[in-house]
């Protein structure tokens, strides 16, 4: 059964309340009843098991039976930075990387990216992405929401990435294969994925000057949204998060 998000601050005396669309889904679709158990998370790494006391289309009241730290989250702190694409493609990226277990997502602007017009539209898009991330979290049974940062410009992304020991810039013109390149043990990585049309050479030079290494994802040209998901899965595997050789994180 899927997990449901609850607001940890709203927990009181061992009880929780689920409202709005989730309540309707629990009542109408899942047809849960009083005394049924339910799985929940606060979106910050803590899971809860509860017992339903009351259920209606508007509100579900739950008694908390147990609380435990999530076992589904990774020790790998993985940041994905993707150049702005057309909106439905960005929607698909956030849906998929939530399922993969990515820690945070930074959309950014570069020379060939798709611009958003105005702060109002930008805020609306961020709200939309957060809604998509919440729905994807419930489906895949994660316990931490992806941290979605406001769109940055390219230089801001490079500056943000300096705190990460692993810095990967994936570029279709690179001839450096990814396999066998990771030797350092660390739990903080950042990936850079360009827009449709790819990065310009000057942007890659700037990334390399900021500590990134440019890698190839193979001989075929991938769509930007495909490259984002592919790169995340490969790095997670190489750093021990998807069945690869496990690292001892500090």
Image: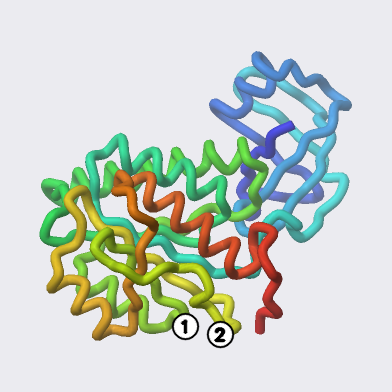
Apparent side of residue 79 relative to residue 66 in the rendered image (left or right): left
Residue visible at 33% across and 49% down in the picture: 220
Front disc: 2 or 1: 2
Query: Mark 2 and 1 residues: CB-CB less than 8 Å, in contact?
Result: yes
Residue visible at 77% across and 48% down in the picture: 48
Residue placed under numbered mark 1 in the picture: 165
Count residues near mark 1 (Cα–Cα under 10 Å), then give few for <14, some for 14-19, many for 20+.
some
Circle number at residue 223? none
The quarter of the picture where the N terminus appears is top right
Could you tell me residue 56's position as x and y percent?
68, 19
Element under label 1?
Answer: loop
Q: Is residue 107 visible?
A: no
Which of the two residues, 175 or 167, is positioned nearer the viewer here? 175
Residue placed under numbered mark 2 in the picture: 184
Apparent side of residue 91 relative to residue 124 in the rendered image (left or right): right
Quarter of the image holding residue 79?
bottom left
Q: Is residue 39 above or below residue 60?
A: below
Residue visible at 36% across and 83% down in the picture: 162
Which of the two residues, 167 or 45, is positioned nearer the viewer here? 167
Disc on the earlier residue, 2 or 1: 1
Residue visible at 19% across and 46% down in the picture: 120
Could you tell me residue 208's position as x and y percent?
27, 80
């Amino acid at each position: 059964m899927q997990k449901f998000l609850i607001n940890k601050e709203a927990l009181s005396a061992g009880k929780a309340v689920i409202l709005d669309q989730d309540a309707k889904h629990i009542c109408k679709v899942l047809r849960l009843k009083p005394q049924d158990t339910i799985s929940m998370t606060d979106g910050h790494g803590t899971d809860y098991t509860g017992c339903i006391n009351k259920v209606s289309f508007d509100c579900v009241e739950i008694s908390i039976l147990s609380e435990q730290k999530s076992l589904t989250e990774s020790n790998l702190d993985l940041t994905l930075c993707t150049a702005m694409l057309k909106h439905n493609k960005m929607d698909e990226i956030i849906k998929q990387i939530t399922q993969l277990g990515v820690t945070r997502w930074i959309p950014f602007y570069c020379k060939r990216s798709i611009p958003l017009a105005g702060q109002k539209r930008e805020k609306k898009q961020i709200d939309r992405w957060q809604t998509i991330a919440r729905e994807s979290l419930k489906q895949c049974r994660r316990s931490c929401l992806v941290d979605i940062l406001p769109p940055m410009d390219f230089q801001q992304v490079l500056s943000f990435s300096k705190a990460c020991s692993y810095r990967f810039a994936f570029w279709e013109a690179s001839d450096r294969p990814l396999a066998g390149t990771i030797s350092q043990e660390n739990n903080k990585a950042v990936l850079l994925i360009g827009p449709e049309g790819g990065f310009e050479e000057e942007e890659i030079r700037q990334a390399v000057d900021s500590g990134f290494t440019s890698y190839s994802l193979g001989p075929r040209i991938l769509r930007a949204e495909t490259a984002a998901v592919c790169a995340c899965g490969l790095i997670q595997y190489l750093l021990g998060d998807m069945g690869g050789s496990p690292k001892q994180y500090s």
